[in-house]
Amino acid sequence: VEAGFHHPILYSYFRSSCSWRVRIALALKGIDYETVPINLIKDGGQQFSKDFQALNPMKQVPALKIDGITIHQSLAIIEYLEETRPTPRLLPQDPKKRASVRMISDLIAGGIQPLQNLSVLKQVGEEFQLTWAQNAIISGFNALEQILQSTAGTYCVGDEVSCPQVFLYYRFKVDCTLYPTISSINKRLLVLEAFQVTHPCRQPDTPTELRA
Amino acid sequence: VEAGFHHPILYSYFRSSCSWRVRIALALKGIDYETVPINLIKDGGQQFSKDFQALNPMKQVPALKIDGITIHQSLAIIEYLEETRPTPRLLPQDPKKRASVRMISDLIAGGIQPLQNLSVLKQVGEEFQLTWAQNAIISGFNALEQILQSTAGTYCVGDEVSCPQVFLYYRFKVDCTLYPTISSINKRLLVLEAFQVTHPCRQPDTPTELRA
């Protein structure tokens, strides 16, 4: 019997924001899972191993083994969890609000993150990495801040926590005071238990010096 | 009464593959709509106009005005159409197959396209654009080809047309013979009416010399 039939296995890297997004969804839904850490920088990148490539040909985390299948792409994983474990819900009931959640999720997962993942930054070259990543975040955040002004309540869309999307970008030193709506939603999310227990500084593979 | 309440308005650019994806979805579902062309290269880029930025702060096509709201991000638009106009369906009924469709869609819309859109290529600089775009496509296609080998029937996932994802990348001169599964699915899709009528060479804003 495949392990995936027993309980889900999440292939995750503590610092990957896409992995964190899935960890939050699993935590919000109260789904038990096992973490298999994939270290993106050790051994030249464990995501390039033959075994992992067979699991996810995109050589990226996260990947989730669940119900006998393996799903990658964080938003596809979250949609699957929502369809098969509907409560508590991660998407609002109203189709128009669902559209807002997906629009915001796609903006972040498709419009910001792909431009600043490890393999892209390598291609850009060390000298330009910071500016490059900042440009991606700034242009995405400018748009997001404007969109949230019409969709947000306590959280991104209304007052319910939905697909978790907003993350800190401390790494790239973007001035968060420019984005008051994003920052305040982020603050409200970070105190929730599902965000606390799944935090990058509290993962099985978090190095000791980064633990908190 | 807002125009969006009457019939949908699609803000589209003939050559944008994300716009094309939404045009295909609208055509497959038989939804009448009006096209408002946004020329991404004319006038320094019409997506940067004040009017368009108010509509989509990400300054990207497509955007769809429908049912009194404006949605951007092509996959969010398609999910909304699927939820509000369920037949004919663009997603399979089985949650595991739905996960495959979304995984493939996210791979393309999040893993390949963002790296080769206009604003990113501009940042990369003219000298490196072709190699950069090719790298993004090749690494995405290598993964996609492998994934499709376990999901594809006539089309990407089984034998039903799903969220349309596979596009030609002629522009960047990637050798398609390296991707037999992708190429053959693409061929089978391109002969379908919904793909024909929405083709970049047959749009209201297609320049005469590119029409076919």
Image: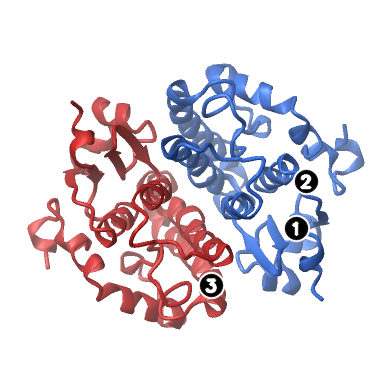
Chain colours: A red, B blue
The local secondary structure at tag 3 comes to helix
Q: Nearer the viewer, mark 1 or mark 3?
A: 1
Numbered badge on residue A142: 3
Q: Are marks 1 and 2 in contact (CB under 8 Å)?
A: no
Looking at the image, which is closer to me, B129 or B5?
B5
Give the quadrant of the C terminus of chain B: top right
Q: Tell me if mark 2 has few (under 14), some (14-19) or many (20+) residues whose alpha carbon lies within 10 angstroms of its own.
A: many
In the rendering, at what x and y percent does residue A73 appear?
40, 44
Residue at the spot 47% in from the left edge and 76% down from the top edge: A158
Query: Which residue is situated farthest in the left direction here?
Result: A208
Q: Tell me if mark 3 has few (under 14), some (14-19) or many (20+) residues whose alpha carbon lies within 10 angstroms of its own.
A: some
The local secondary structure at tag 2 comes to loop
Residue at which label 1 appears: B11
Numbered badge on residue B14: 2
Give the quadrant of the N terminus of chain B: bottom right
Whole-Å distance between the Cαs marked 2 and 3? Answer: 26 Å
Looking at the image, which is closer to me, B211 or A81?
A81
Disc 3 marks which amino acid?
Asn
In the rendering, at what x and y percent does residue B160 appear?
60, 29
Relative horizontal placement of residue A118, taking residue B179 as reference (left or right):
left
Whole-Å distance between the Cαs marked 1 and 2? Answer: 10 Å
